[in-house]
Image (cartoon, helix red, strand yellow):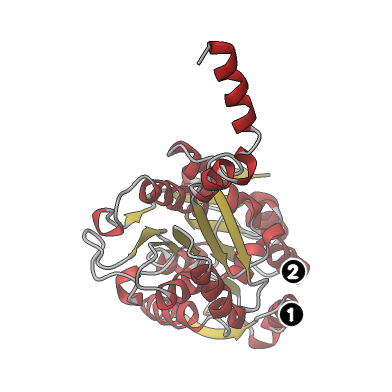
């Protein structure tokens, strides 16, 4: 066959590719499931950090990987069905983004790899048997937010030395996180001689009511439980409410303090999601969850709003100002 005839034949065959070869190529593109308790518009930067991790492993959304996002929009009871849908679609890996999402994803499958992010102890939660040698199909990253919960109580006490009573805001719809932080905060407060009032909120409206009621409880300051999708996604709103009612509040993350929250202290959620993206990419490249030890996000950040402190009549020790990653004035 002459070269010209061969090229003509090849060109004719190529016309049929969209129905055969192209479909086969599309089937080879891996699909990652991303499961989260919150809403997409409120978790943009965290999902972006996850994609950045995937990119570093050579996987770019829309090019050589597909991401199927499943958002519960704050309705935690939707998580099991959302996870089941990802399992039915036989995704290559599920990102259990957040404690509840991770627990639900693990319960949904014993075969599909699950990469989690959590602020809690993954061994205590039952996600893995060991940080260094996770068994089964689950691995991921954890922030230091649970471990530093007692430190938040200490910092609040340092700023409010005359206060004898504080409050802890938890989400009753997230009992795993609420119970663990209630235990840790109460233990830390006990050593400092502080009384702790537990206040609850599972919606934005309830957040407003809970913070508004602190005056009646005579709680001098507020610790906000970390690791919850509602508080993570609505940190700016929570800070705004705290400012409205002149409540000295401590949470974690820059957004909370930039919006008027007094103090932020905790592990980096962004780094944790970034690590999860890297792990998802490594699994897509053939590695097994059992060969990927759980990573602890070692980065701890502190932010202080001196303008809020001044408005509340609080003197911030110079040592805290120097230690802060960023100070808002």
Q: Mark 2 or 1 closer to N-term?
A: 1
Label at residue 228:
none
Closer to the camera in the image, 129 or 198: 129
Q: Residue furthest top?
A: 3
Closer to the camera in the image, 268 or 122: 122
The total number of labels drawn is: 2
Residue 203 location in percent, x, y?
Answer: 70, 78
Above/below status of 46 relative to 128? above
Residue 308 location in percent, x, y?
Answer: 69, 56
Describe the element under mark 1 as helix, strand or loop.
helix
Residue beneath label 1, please? 212
Q: Residue furthest front?
A: 1
Q: Residue at x 65, y 81 (%)?
A: 202
Write down the quadrant of residue 78 in the picture.
Answer: bottom right
Describe the element under mark 2 as helix, strand or loop.
helix
In space, the residues marked 2 and 1 are separated at their CA atoms by 8 Å
Residue 98 location in percent, x, y?
Answer: 50, 66
Closer to the camera in the image, 83 or 267: 83
Residue beneath label 2, please? 241
Q: Residue at x 64, y 72 (%)?
A: 72
- Residues marked 2 and 1 touching at CB (< 8 Å): yes
Above/below status of 130 relative to 204? above
- Residue count near mark 1 (Cα–Cα under 10 Å), binned few <14, some 14–19, many ≥20: some
């Amino acid at each position: 066959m002459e070269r010209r005839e061969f090229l003509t034949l090849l060109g004719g065959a190529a016309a049929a590719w969209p129905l055969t070869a192209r479909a086969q190529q599309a089937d080879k593109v891996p699909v990652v499931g991303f499961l989260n308790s919150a809403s997409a518009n409120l978790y943009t930067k965290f999902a972006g950090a996850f994609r950045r991790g995937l990119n570093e492993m050579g996987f770019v959304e829309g090019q050589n990987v597909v991401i199927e996002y499943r958002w519960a929009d704050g309705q935690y009871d939707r998580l099991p069905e959302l996870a089941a849908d990802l399992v039915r679609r036989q995704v290559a890996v599920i990102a259990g983004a957040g404690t509840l999402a991770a627990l639900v994803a693990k319960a949904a499958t014993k075969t599909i790899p699950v990469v989690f992010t959590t602020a809690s102890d993954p061994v205590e939660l039952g996600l893995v048997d060991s940080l260094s040698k996770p068994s089964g199909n689950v691995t991921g990253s954890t922030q230091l937010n649970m471990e530093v919960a007692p430190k938040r109580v200490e910092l609040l006490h340092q700023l409010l030395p005359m206060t004898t009573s504080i409050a802890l805001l938890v989400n009753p719809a997230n009992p795993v996180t609420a119970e663990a932080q209630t235990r840790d905060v109460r233990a830390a407060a006990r050593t400092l001689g502080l009384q702790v009032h537990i206040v609850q909120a599972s919606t934005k409206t309830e957040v407003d009511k809970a913070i508004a009621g602190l005056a009646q409880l005579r709680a001098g300051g507020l610790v906000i439980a970390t690791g919850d999708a509602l508080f993570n996604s609505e940190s700016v709103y929570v800070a705004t409410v705290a400012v409205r009612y002149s409540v000295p509040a401590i949470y974690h993350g820059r957004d909370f303090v930039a919006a008027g929250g007094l103090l932020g202290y905790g592990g980096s959620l962004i780094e944790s999601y970034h690590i999860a993206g890297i792990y998802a990419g490594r699994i897509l490249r053939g590695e097994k969850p059992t060969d990927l030890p759980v990573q602890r996000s070692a980065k701890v950040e502190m932010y202080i709003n001196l303008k809020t402190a001044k408005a509340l009549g609080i003197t911030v020790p110079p040592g805290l100002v120097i230690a802060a990653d960023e100070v808002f004035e």
